[in-house]
Image (cartoon, rainbow, N blue to C red):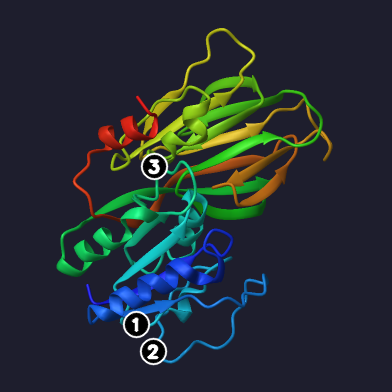
């Protein structure tokens, strides 16, 4: 690889110290490196497309893909898993491989620790890496015949209570067939990548990230028999908010990758399926998923 683009979490990389180090190191090796400039105003609308920038139609919240030069071959994301999730969602239509560099604490998505940056850069330069596709899920929130939100998730879509401390009733359908009714604090619909996130904390199964499955887990279900469910990637899941709750205070809220969200009330539903899009994640180490899991879990 010869040309790189750096996206950094400014809270974890103050004054762009690490980003600047990466650019200097790559330029010393005869490579080109761009650093994302700040200045996003939060409106989701950017200025004119810069000359030589790539065109990616998907909307963005944090990184305007249209400002990434056409010659970029790889995106380096400095921060934690949250920063990498944001970058993956914003750049999903660009087909650019991403490498996460962990500047936080525990991180499953960000493969490289900040102490090993130089080794990772050397491997990228010499071509000693692989690219691993990760599946996404797509969700649509509906109120009667009106679509409230349409978005994607690399980790999970989580539906939880919104307001007072009480359970929410959910009706779950798979391919149009009623599966079960749940009374719980929430529901998690997760990808294999997200299996080590919220899904793991509620006792859901851990799945290798390169798999293509959909995981369904209830949060604190009020039953003795509820179990997480693993579904094939070609199903459509509908989660409907039960009839018990009918006001904004007593409604629910669906969140996509801990970022975008929408409020739901009785009768509203989320329709979830595998997305046609994919995220390309770079691996510079030969460490297996099980070894990474053991290391992160300190076992």
The 10 Å Cα crowd at callout 2, few under 14, some 14 to 19, many 20 or more, is few
Horizontal and vertical percent for residue 184?
65, 22
Residue pointed to by mark 2: 52
Image spot of residue 249 (x, y percent): 84, 37
Q: Toward the viewer: 200 or 115?
A: 115
Residue on which disc 1 sits:
70
* SS category of the residue bearing label 3: helix
In the picture, residue 180 is in which quadrant?
Answer: top right
Q: CA distance from mark 3 to mark 1?
A: 28 Å
At label 3, counting other C-alpha atoms closer than 10 Å, the crowd grade (few under 14, some 14-19, many 20 or more) is many
| Distance Cα–Cα, label 2 vs label 3 | 33 Å
If you read the primary sequence from the N terminus, does the residue marked by circle 2 or circle 3 appear first? 2
What mark, if any, has residue 250 been given in the picture?
none
The earlier-in-sequence mark between 1 and 2 is 2
Element on which disc 1 rests: loop
Q: In this image, 299 relative to 89: left or right?
A: left
In the image, residue 134 lies at what x, y percent?
34, 49
| Distance CA(mark 1)–CA(mark 2) | 6 Å
Numbered label tally: 3
Of all residues shown, which one is farthest toward the bottom? 51
Quick one: 12 or 216, which is closer to the camera?
12
User: Circle 3 is placed at which residue position?
Assistant: 193
Label 1: few (<14), some (14–19) or many (≥20) C-alpha neighbours in 10 Å: few
Q: Is residue 152 visible?
A: yes
Q: Is residue 201 left or right of residue 293?
A: right
Quarter occupied by the N terminus: bottom left
Q: Are marks 3 and 1 in contact (CB under 8 Å)?
A: no
Q: Does label 3 or label 1 sit earlier along the sequence?
A: 1
Question: Is 179 positioned to the left or the right of 128 in the image?
Answer: right
Tag 2 secondary structure: loop
Q: Do the residues bearing badges 1 and 2 touch, measured as CB atoms within 8 Å?
A: yes
């Amino acid at each position: 690889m010869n040309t790189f683009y750096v996206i950094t979490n400014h809270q974890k990389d103050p004054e762009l110290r690490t980003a600047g180090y990466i650019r200097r190191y790559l330029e010393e090796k005869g490579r080109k490196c761009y650093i994302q400039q700040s200045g996003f105003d939060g409106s989701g609308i950017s200025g004119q497309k810069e000359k030589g920038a790539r065109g990616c139609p998907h909307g963005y919240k944090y990184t305007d893909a249209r400002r990434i030069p056409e010659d970029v071959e790889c995106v380096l994301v400095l921060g934690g898993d949250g920063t990498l999730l944001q970058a993956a969602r914003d750049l999903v239509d660009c087909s650019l491989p991403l490498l996460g560099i962990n500047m936080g604490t525990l991180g499953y998505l960000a493969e490289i620790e900040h102490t090993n940056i130089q080794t990772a850069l050397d491997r990228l330069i010499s071509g000693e890496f692989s690219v691993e596709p990760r599946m996404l899920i797509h969700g649509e929130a509906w109120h009667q015949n009106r679509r409230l939100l349409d978005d994607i998730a690399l980790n999970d879509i989580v539906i939880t209570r919104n307001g007072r401390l009480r359970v929410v009733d959910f009706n779950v359908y798979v391919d149009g067939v009623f599966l079960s009714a749940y009374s719980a604090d929430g529901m998690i619909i997760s990808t294999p990548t997200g299996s080590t996130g919220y899904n793991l904390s509620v006792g859901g199964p851990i799945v290798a990230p390169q798999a293509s499955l959909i995981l369904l887990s209830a949060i604190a279900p009020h039953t003795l028999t509820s179990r997480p469910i693993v579904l094939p990637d070609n199903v459509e899941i509908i989660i409907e908010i039960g009839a018990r709750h009918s006001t904004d205070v007593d409604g629910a809220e669906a969140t996509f990758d801990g970022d975008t969200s929408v409020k739901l009330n009785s009768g509203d539903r989320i329709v979830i399926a595998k997305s046609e899009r994919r995220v390309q994640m770079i691996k510079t180490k030969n460490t297996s998923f099980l070894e990474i899991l053991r290391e992160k879990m300190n076992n």
